[in-house]
């Protein structure tokens, strides 16, 4: 159980690039990082492309005005001059900027926590991975839903053979808020997501499905995709060539199969985020709408509903619970769990603790590269007319 006690010697000195007043994700980063005040301390930021607005925002967060910077380059330069300068930075900016900011941060001697999708090309990911290894730094990726401890219960059940051999993986992340196409022009957080120059080669594949794909890899780490087939649509025509709906089929190396549905135009849907793992003996199903519950369906037996934080769950699951089974947890706790693991990973890297890094389950640079690989191959398949392509 987590109760806020320190897991590292001192809070990490933390800064942010982006995540300002008009962004959609900045508050989630701060909720996660500051939930345990023993993990991170927000000391600096280049919060906005508009320097005046960013400074005003930072001051309202309680950041020293002199450490509210007009841009990330200035922040990295000025913080490097301070004895108490930041040592880790979160990148919560539009997709097209991730690569250059991440590279600059590593070259400035900073650990990095970056939004997804990490970059546009697998080669960029491999380059940053090599740079991070050279600099002795951690690169984490904020797949924020993946901090739910119920996913660790699913991982343990798969590992321990409770489901038997895995045959099918069903993935879905959909909502209906993309039906409001006017938001493409009026909402600051939406505008860039439908601009291919900024968002990259995809909309919902990068914005939504990368979350669920990583969660499936967390649950089933030994399941490797062999081939993928993707068919994507732009039901709001002005979004072409970006998709607002996509269907993907997967073939795994062990003979299992899978499906992914990602959509921003599932009209009326508030949050259709679910994962179902089907084995030869039993199935498990997680829904983000009920994050404290896990359906466990054994063939020939009554359906069981497993509840978060109960003693019958695996230790790996309950190690991350915070509030007890009586009280519901959700997305803020998931983000907090991810950020706490980022802090533990950074601390371990600084100390040369290879054993902790080896056993820590969190979305690292490799998870980010896999997310890039997922999007690249799906786009490749769709652009070729929806054909099977080798996953590479």
Image (cartoon, rainbow, N blue to C red):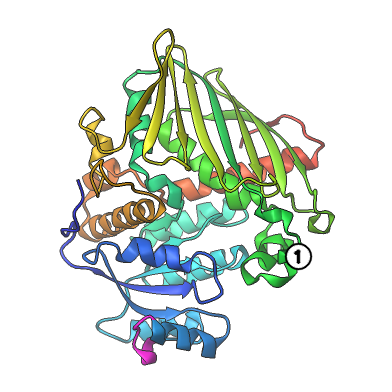
Pick whichever, 283 or 44, lies toward us: 283
> Looking at the image, which residue is at 53% across and 27% down?
169
Q: Quadrant of the N terminus?
A: top left
Q: Is residue 229 visible?
A: yes
| Residue 391 quadrant | top right
The residue lying furthest to the top in this view is 300
Left or right: residue 137 versus residue 191 is left
Left or right: residue 134 versus residue 311 is right
Q: Is residue 106 visible?
A: no
Q: Give coordinates of residue 281: x percent, y percent.
A: 42, 12
Pick whichever, 84 or 31, lies toward us: 31
Q: Is disc 1 surrounded by few (<14), some (14 to 19) or many (20+) residues within 10 Å?
A: few
> Looking at the image, which residue is at 41% across and 41% down?
291
Pick whichever, 165 or 261, lies toward us: 261
Q: Give coordinates of residue 52: x percent, y percent.
A: 53, 91
Q: Give coordinates of residue 212: x percent, y percent.
A: 52, 41
Left or right: residue 70 versus residue 206 is left
Left or right: residue 257 versus residue 194 is left
On the image, numbered disc 1 is attached to which residue?
A: 182
Q: Give coordinates of residue 100: x percent, y percent.
A: 55, 69
Q: Quadrant of the C terminus?
A: top right
Callout 1: SS: loop
Q: Which residues are magenta?
A: 61-67
> Looking at the image, which residue is at 64% across and 42% down?
262
Pick whichever, 310 or 122, lies toward us: 310
Residue 64 lies in the magenta stretch: yes
- The answer to whether 27 is drawn above or below residue 222 in the figure is below
- The answer to whether 89 is drawn above or below residue 161 in the figure is below
Residue 331 lies in the magenta stretch: no
């Amino acid at each position: 159980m987590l109760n806020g006690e320190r897991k590292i010697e001192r809070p990490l000195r933390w800064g942010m690039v982006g995540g300002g007043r008009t962004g959609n994700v900045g508050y989630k980063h701060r909720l996660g990082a500051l939930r345990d005040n023993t993990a991170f301390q927000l000391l600096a930021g280049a919060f906005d492309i508009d320097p005046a607005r960013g400074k005003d925002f930072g001051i309202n967060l309680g950041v020293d005005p002199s450490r509210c910077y007009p841009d990330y380059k200035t922040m990295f330069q000025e913080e490097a001059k301070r004895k108490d300068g930041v040592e880790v930075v979160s990148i919560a900016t539009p997709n097209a900027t991730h690569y250059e900011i991440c590279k600059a941060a590593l070259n400035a001697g900073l650990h990095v926590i970056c939004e997804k999708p990490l970059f546009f090309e697998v080669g960029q990911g491999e380059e940053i991975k090599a740079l991070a290894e050279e600099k002795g730094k951690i690169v984490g990726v904020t797949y924020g839903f993946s901090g739910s401890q119920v996913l660790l219960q699913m991982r343990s059940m798969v590992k321990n053979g409770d489901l038997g051999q895995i045959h099918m993986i069903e993935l879905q992340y959909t909502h209906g808020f993309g039906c409001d196409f006017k938001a493409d022009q009026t909402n600051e957080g939406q505008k860039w997501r439908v601009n291919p120059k900024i968002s990259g080669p995809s909309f919902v594949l990068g914005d939504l499905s990368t979350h669920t794909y990583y969660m499936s890899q967390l649950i089933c780490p030994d399941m490797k995709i062999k081939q993928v087939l993707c068919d994507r649509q732009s039901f709001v025509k002005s979004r072409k060539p970006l998709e607002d709906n996509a269907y993907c089929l997967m073939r795994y190396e062990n003979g299992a199969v899978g499906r992914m549905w990602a959509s921003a135009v599932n009209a009326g849907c508030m949050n259709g985020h679910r994962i179902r793992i089907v084995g030869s003996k039993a199935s498990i199903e997680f829904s983000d709408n009920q994050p404290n519950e896990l359906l466990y369906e054994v063939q020939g037996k009554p359906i069981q509903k497993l509840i978060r934080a109960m003693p019958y769950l695996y230790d790996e699951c309950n190690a991350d619970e915070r509030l007890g089974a009586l009280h519901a947890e959700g997305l803020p706790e998931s983000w907090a769990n991810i950020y706490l693991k980022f802090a533990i990973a950074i601390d371990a890297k600084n100390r040369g603790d290879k054993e902790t890094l080896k056993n820590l389950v969190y979305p690292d640079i490799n998870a980010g590269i896999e997310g890039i690989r997922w999007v690249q191959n799906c786009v490749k398949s769709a652009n070729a007319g929806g054909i099977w392509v080798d996953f590479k």
